[in-house]
Image (cartoon, helix red, strand yellow):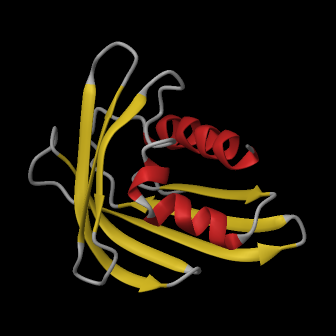
C-alpha cells in the first residue's frame, strides 16, 4: 500500500452518465464536494478539455473554507478523467486524481485514485474522500 495514495472502488446504482455529470458539471459538483456532511459547495468552475482548468470552493459546517484547483490532463468522455490537484492552503504542491468509470451489473463502477499526496499534508485523504463519496452516493440515489 502506498502511503501517499488513496484508492476507492465504488458501485453506484445509476448510469455512467449520472456519475460522469457529477464529476464534470459545476452545479452538480457543488451538491457533493467536500467531506463535511453538513458542509456546502460555494463555487465551482470547470473547463472540461485537456489543458482546461477547474476550481472548487467548499465550506465546512464550522465555517472553514477549502479551495482546490488544477488542470485536466486526460479526458475520455464517460470513461476517464485525470487532473492535477492543488490546495490553495498548500501552495507549490501537486497531486493527481484519476477517475475511471465503467458499467457493471448494478449501474456504474468507479475506480478512484488520488496519488502523489504530500506526506506533510494536513488533510486525511482516505477519510475525506470517503466522506465525500458518501455525499455523492446520497445525491445520485435521489
Residue 48 locus on image (x, y percent): 34, 75
Residue beneath the point at 44% across and 56% down: 5
Q: Quadrant of residue 114?
A: bottom left
> Position of 110 compared to 49: left or right?
right
> Position of 48 compared to 133: left or right?
left
Residue most toward the left?
Answer: 92
Q: Is residue 35 above or below residue 111?
A: above
Count the marks: how many? 0
Q: Where does the N terminus fall, quadrant-wise?
A: bottom right
Residue 30 locus on image (x, y percent): 42, 44
Residue beneath the point at 73% across and 43% down: 142
Q: Is residue 26 above or below residue 40?
A: below
Seen from the viewer's position, the closer of residues 109 and 77 is 77
Q: Quadrant of residue 106?
A: bottom right
Can residue 120 be seen?
no
Q: Is residue 90 above or below residue 48?
A: above
Residue beneath the point at 40% across and 61% down: 115
Amino acid at each position: 500500500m502506498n502511503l501517499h495514495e488513496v484508492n476507492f472502488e465504488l458501485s453506484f446504482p445509476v448510469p455512467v452518465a449520472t456519475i460522469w455529470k457529477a464529476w464534470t458539471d459545476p452545479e452538480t459538483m457543488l451538491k457533493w464536494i467536500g467531506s463535511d456532511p453538513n458542509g456546502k459547495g460555494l463555487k465551482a468552475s470547470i473547463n472540461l478539455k485537456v489543458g482546461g482548468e477547474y476550481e472548487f470552493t467548499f465550506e465546512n459546517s464550522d465555517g472553514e473554507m477549502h479551495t482546490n484547483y488544477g488542470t485536466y490532463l486526460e479526458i475520455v468522455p464517460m470513461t476517464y478523467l485525470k487532473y492535477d490537484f492543488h490546495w490553495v492552503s498548500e501552495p507549490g504542491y501537486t497531486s493527481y486524481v484519476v477517475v475511471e468509470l465503467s458499467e457493471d451489473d448494478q449501474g456504474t463502477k468507479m475506480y478512484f485514485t488520488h496519488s502523489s499526496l504530500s506526506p506533510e499534508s494536513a488533510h486525511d485523504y482516505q477519510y475525506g474522500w470517503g466522506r465525500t463519496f458518501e455525499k455523492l452516493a446520497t445525491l445520485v440515489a435521489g
